[in-house]
Amino acid sequence: MTSPPSLTPESRWSDEHVEQFIGRLLQFGVILAAAVTLFGAIILLAHNGGTVADFRVFKGASPELRSVGAIVRGVIALDGRAITQLGLVLLILTPVARVAQQAAGLLPDAIQRKFMQKAGVDRMAALLTAIDIVRRGGTISLVGVYGGMADPMPMLQIFDKQIQLRMGQANVRRWSSQILPLLTDEDPLHVDSFATHHLPLSDGPAAYESFQQKNDGMVKVLLNP
């Protein structure tokens, strides 16, 4: 019995993959729109190449080409004007995927929360990396908050590697009776001195960089607003 094929990071949807997909989609859309428009122009010139155009009066699209159904019927009939119109429509629709992705981040918080509860997707790079590197039969503990209801999970790899996932909110009420007596002025756990650095909020970006590089013995940082 052979094991299921291992899923690599390249075979799954990560943030980088989404960006690459949208980029390729935009390229394909522009090329397709240009090809359709060129094809329609060739047919239009072949049928009306000898007609002299009067540019003194602006004429918009013909009434029969102002609906999607009419354009489709014209394309089926190999009408050059309809094919050209279809190319222009494709060019207009091409950036929709990019606009939709960017617009999602501009929604009000209340709408974003509803969206995440129905169709939201988290940034999965860290979790997918953990799934890749954990040993067979190992356990992955999620300390971050994942709130997307449509997160793509590599279930085949999780099943094949027999991975256990541990996550959830802290059981505050269960442990509060034991923890609170330790948070006294005597500070038996030395929580008051646990923070190695106290910095203003404006130094946050630099603090993140220093923490990542572990400069100056940085372990815990408190940002003061």
Image (spheres, rainbow, N blue to C red):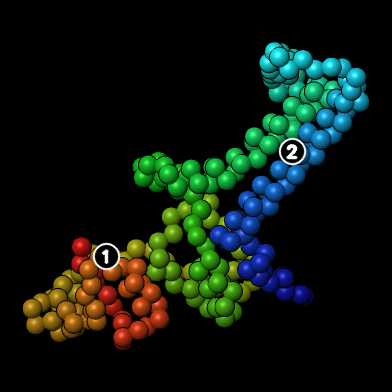
Helix, strand, or loop for circle 2? helix
Residue 202, labelled with which disc?
Answer: 1
> Compared with residue 34, is residue 10 higher up or lower down, i.e. above or below?
below
Helix, strand, or loop for circle 1? helix
Classify residue 80 as left or right of residue 166. right
The image quadrant of residue 145 is bottom left
Foreground pick, 53 / 26:
53
Classify residue 158 as left or right of residue 111. right
Residue at 91 percent across and 26 percent down: it is 46
Residue 104, labelled with which disc?
Answer: none
Does residue 155 show up? Answer: no
**Residue 150, image x and y in percent?**
53, 51
Classify residue 220 as left or right of residue 67. left
- Say which label, 2 or 1, has the lower sequence index: 2
The image quadrant of residue 80 is top right
> Compared with residue 46, is residue 215 higher up or lower down, i.e. above or below?
below
Q: What residue type is labelled 1?
A: Ser
Q: What residue type is labelled 2?
A: Ala
Q: Which quadrant does the N terminus fall into?
A: bottom right
Residue, disc 2: 33
